[in-house]
Amino acid sequence: MARRSDHSRDEIHQLALAAAEALIDEGGLQALSARKVASRIGYTVGTLYMVFKNLDDLILQVNGRTLDLLHQRLQGRLSERIGGKDELMQLAAAYIEFAQTETPRWGMLFEYIVDDDGELPGWYQEKLGRVFGPVEQALQATLPACASDKVRQASRVLWASVHGICMLKIRQRLNLAGGQTTRQMVEMLVDNFLVGMGCKE
């Protein structure tokens, strides 16, 4: 087993996060434990807990990296700001694609929310806000007369609905929605949402 002096604290931190992600990819939440992470990187559980407060802290940081990756995928889908329905459809497609290609890590965002006192850490809330950022920007460009706080709330409501469609796709339950494709469902959702918000293209 490696000695503690073999890697710096920061290196152990990064090794542990990468090992945790690999375990999640292989078997989901049930495959993850402090013992397995420590064993995979060649250190003791005690060393692991010198870097992370506990397993909850490790999982929260893994989820934070997943949010960063999701944000990159959403931003990467948009080569330019086109606004309106088309931009929202592209973002929705990127989100569903992310859920399909990164299913175990995507699922962890919703399976395991950790906090100490009912309030997520500020750094984690900032990452969540960045994920919603592209949706807020698309809505704000489409609804320039709307107050920013209303757009912020609307972006979360819209994305919660897209997430619901995504869950049906991932769990292979699209038949519950009459056999429509995810694109058809998202398009109907976005059309009606924009009309309800007072936007008619």
Image (spheres, helix red, strand yellow):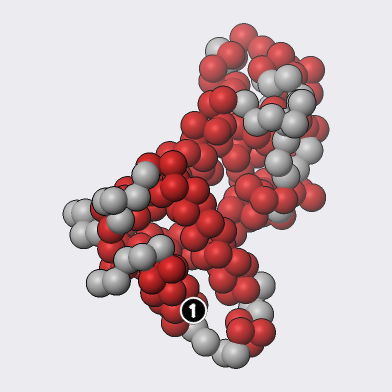
Q: Which image quadrant is residue 1 in?
A: top right
Residue at image position (28%, 63%) is 84
Q: Position of residue 89 (x, y in %)?
A: 36, 67
| Res. 26 visible in picture | yes
Residue 153 place in picture, x, y as percent: 49, 48
Residue at 71% in and 55% down: 27
At horizontal 66% and vertical 72% (from top left) the residue drawn is: 171
Q: Identity of the amino acid at label 1?
A: Met
Quadrant in which the C terminus is drawn: bottom left
Please state the horizontal and vertical placement of residue 112, each as a whole percent of the image: 72, 45
| Residue 178 placement, left or right of 128 | right
Evaluate whether residue 72 shows in this view. no
Q: Residue at x 68, y 36 (%)?
A: 59
Residue 38 location, quadrant = top right
Between 72 and 118, which is closer to the camera in this rendering?
A: 118
Q: Is residue 55 above or below residue 197?
A: above
Q: Disc 1 on helix, strand or loop?
A: helix
The residue under label 1 is 185
Q: Position of residue 56 (x, y in %)?
A: 74, 31
- Does 137 sit left or right of 33 as displayed? left
Residue furthest to the bottom in view is 178
Between 145 and 177, the one lying in front of the other is: 145
